[in-house]
Image (tube, helix red, strand yellow):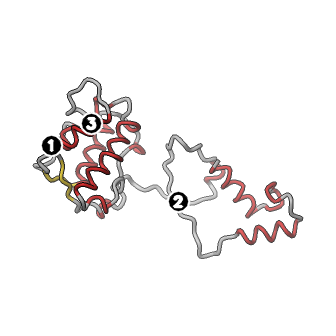
């Protein structure tokens, strides 16, 4: 739906005579409507996109040629969150959020063989949540662990959650183990690093 909407909007800007959404207007009214839809020269449309998002149809190649794209590395602007330490497990040992997410990404790539677009970026958890131990624990469980269990490593949970001993690895089990043991659920020990 989104791709079709953008196509129609784009065509109405550049080819008003071909736009069937403006058929009820005469030619002068159509041109007036298009002028009213135009963006001022100092206004830009910024958007982000995960090209492998399962809920989005692929963008048409001809459509993509009309826009400027810039690839951003998975670690883009990581220096903003590099300084955040988080407490994990019942013993509240300290690790860095950046170090933890990078180690999880290594496991996703090496052990689960996922594509790059499934990795955790620096802002997968908002910086505000990194300042508060309770907010971080809740965000990690509600966002990171849910995403890993239900999407990124859905069929590879034993490969990712190497520190979990149950034969059947469920989301609720992983959450309770995370509360107790922190990053050890991944078979990691980052407290010494």
Looking at the picture, tell me which residue is in the foreground, 135 or 6.
135
- Where disc 2 sits, the SS reads loop
User: Image check: 31 left or right of 122?
Assistant: right
Identify the mark at residue 47; answer none if there is no mark. Answer: 2
Looking at the picture, tell me which residue is in the foreground, 180 or 97.
180
**10 Å crowding of disc 1: few (<14), some (14-19), many (20+):** some
Mark 3 or mark 1, which is nearer to you? Answer: 3
Residue 139 on image: x %, y %: 32, 51
The answer to whether residue 156 is above or below residue 126 is above
Q: Mark 1 points at which residue?
A: 189
**Residue at mark 2 to residue at mark 1: CA–CA distance:** 37 Å
Identify the mark at residue 90; answer none if there is no mark. Answer: none
- Which mark sits nearer the N-terminus, 3 or 2? 2
- Which mark sits nearer the N-terminus, 3 or 1? 3
- Where disc 1 sits, the SS reads loop
Q: In which quarter of the image is residue 13?
A: bottom right
Give the number of callouts: 3
Residue 187 on image: x %, y %: 19, 36
- Where disc 3 sits, the SS reads helix
Identify the mark at residue 174; answer none if there is no mark. Answer: 3
Q: Residue at the spot x=21%, y=37% of the render?
A: 177
Q: Residue at the spot x=30%, y=59% of the render?
A: 129
- Which mark sits nearer the N-terminus, 2 or 1? 2
* Callout 3–callout 1 Cβ contact below 8 Å: no
Mark 3 or mark 2, which is nearer to you? Answer: 3
Looking at the picture, tell me which residue is in the foreground, 169 or 191.
169
Q: Residue at the spot x=83%, y=60% of the render?
A: 17
**Residue at mark 3 to residue at mark 2: CA–CA distance:** 34 Å
User: Image check: 71 left or right of 147?
Assistant: right
Q: Residue at the spot x=50%, y=44% of the render?
A: 53
* Callout 3–callout 2 Cβ contact below 8 Å: no
Residue 178 on image: x %, y %: 22, 41
């Amino acid at each position: 739906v989104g791709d079709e909407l953008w196509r129609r909007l784009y065509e109405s800007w550049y080819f008003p005579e071909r736009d069937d959404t403006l058929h009820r207007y005469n030619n002068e009214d159509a041109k007036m409507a298009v002028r009213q839809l135009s963006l001022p020269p100092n206004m830009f449309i910024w958007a982000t996109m995960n090209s492998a998002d399962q809920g989005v149809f692929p963008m048409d190649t001809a459509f993509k040629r009309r826009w400027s794209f810039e690839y951003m590395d998975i670690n883009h602007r990581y220096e903003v969150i590099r300084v955040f330490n988080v407490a994990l497990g019942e013993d509240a040992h300290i690790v860095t959020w950046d170090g933890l997410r990078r180690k999880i990404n290594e496991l996703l790539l090496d052990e689960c063989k996922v594509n790059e677009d499934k990795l955790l970026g620096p802002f997968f958890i908002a910086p505000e949540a990194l300042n508060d131990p309770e907010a971080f624990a809740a965000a990690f469980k509600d966002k990171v662990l849910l995403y890993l269990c239900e999407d990124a490593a859905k069929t590879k949970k034993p490969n990712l959650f190497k520190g979990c001993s149950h034969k059947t690895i469920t989301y609720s089990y992983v959450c309770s183990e995370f509360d107790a043991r922190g990053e050890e659920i991944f078979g990691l020990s980052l407290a010494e690093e």
